[in-house]
Image (cartoon, rainbow, N blue to C red):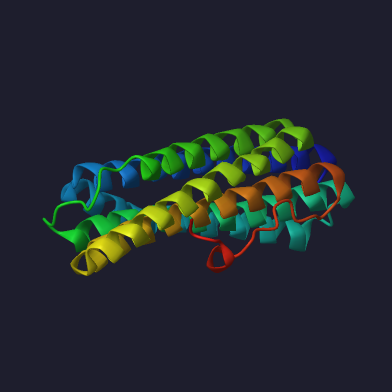
Amino acid sequence: MPRTNLDIELSNLKLQLLEYGSRVKDVIGYGMDALKTRDRAMAESIIQNDARLNETRYALEEQCYSLLATQSPMAHDLRDIISILLIAIELERIADHAKNLAEICIFMGNEPLLKPLIDLPRMSELCQLMLSRALDAFARGDAEAAQAVAAMDDEIDSLYKQVLRELMSCIVQDPHAFTRAMNLLFAGHNLERAGDCITNIAERVIYAKTGELAELNVEEPVSAVTLK
């Protein structure tokens, strides 16, 4: 494949990845909306749509493998292709976490929420903002912007710990609230994991631009957090 055609293929692949990322960003919000409003129809739609998101991920993977196998890309092209491949995988994982919010909504049925949802929607909003900025950093090849995105994950982690403390307190006060508390804790866990996936995307943006591989956020295990 001539150099110009390789450039076109890579450009198209990046555009497809950005469009995929936009769809995944939206589904994070939809998942939280379904949980907040207890909208079973919305939740079921999210779950059904997940198969299409998976198909997009595999289509992107296949194109990456094709370029790697047939075009003998140069070093910077190779980094771009590998980064697109790994980012697509992370996006599919984020979509799975959003789908889990919808599944929690359905599992809860008509039972009342244990507490008003304040921190969980904020976590969802931060995930969407992080992902939007990570994708923008990828589009512009901006390693510094990607570094800043990763730093935002600290706020998501802090909110998750706050949710954990509050829900554990609810269980202590009323052991019968255990199941309802765990449903919300599982929702928080999925959003916290989505934030970690977005941090991984930021790492791939930096790798594509600089060739450097580095873990941006080394987290303290939640089990080691003092709940006070």
Indicate the position of residue 43 as horizontal and vertical percent values: 24, 51
Left or right: 27 as drawn, with respect to 213: left
Left or right: 39 as drawn, with respect to 141: left
**Residue at 33% from the left image edge and 54% from the top image edge:** 101
Judge by depth and name the residue closer to the eye, 197 or 164.
Answer: 164
**Residue at 24% from the left image edge and 55% from the top image edge:** 105
Judge by depth and name the residue closer to the eye, 116 or 188.
Answer: 116
Judge by depth and name the residue closer to the eye, 124 or 114.
Answer: 114
Indicate the position of residue 115 as horizontal and vertical percent values: 25, 48
**Residue at 41% from the left image edge and 45% from the top image edge:** 28
Indicate the position of residue 190 as horizontal and vertical percent values: 44, 57
Left or right: 20 as drawn, with respect to 43: right
Indicate the position of residue 223 as horizontal and vertical percent values: 54, 68
Q: Residue furthest right?
A: 75
Q: Residue furthest left?
A: 110
On screen, residue 177 above or below 156: below
Q: Is residue 27 visible?
A: no
Judge by depth and name the residue closer to the eye, 122 or 145.
Answer: 122
Left or right: 224 as drawn, with respect to 172: right
**Residue at 56% from the left image edge and 61% from the top image edge:** 225
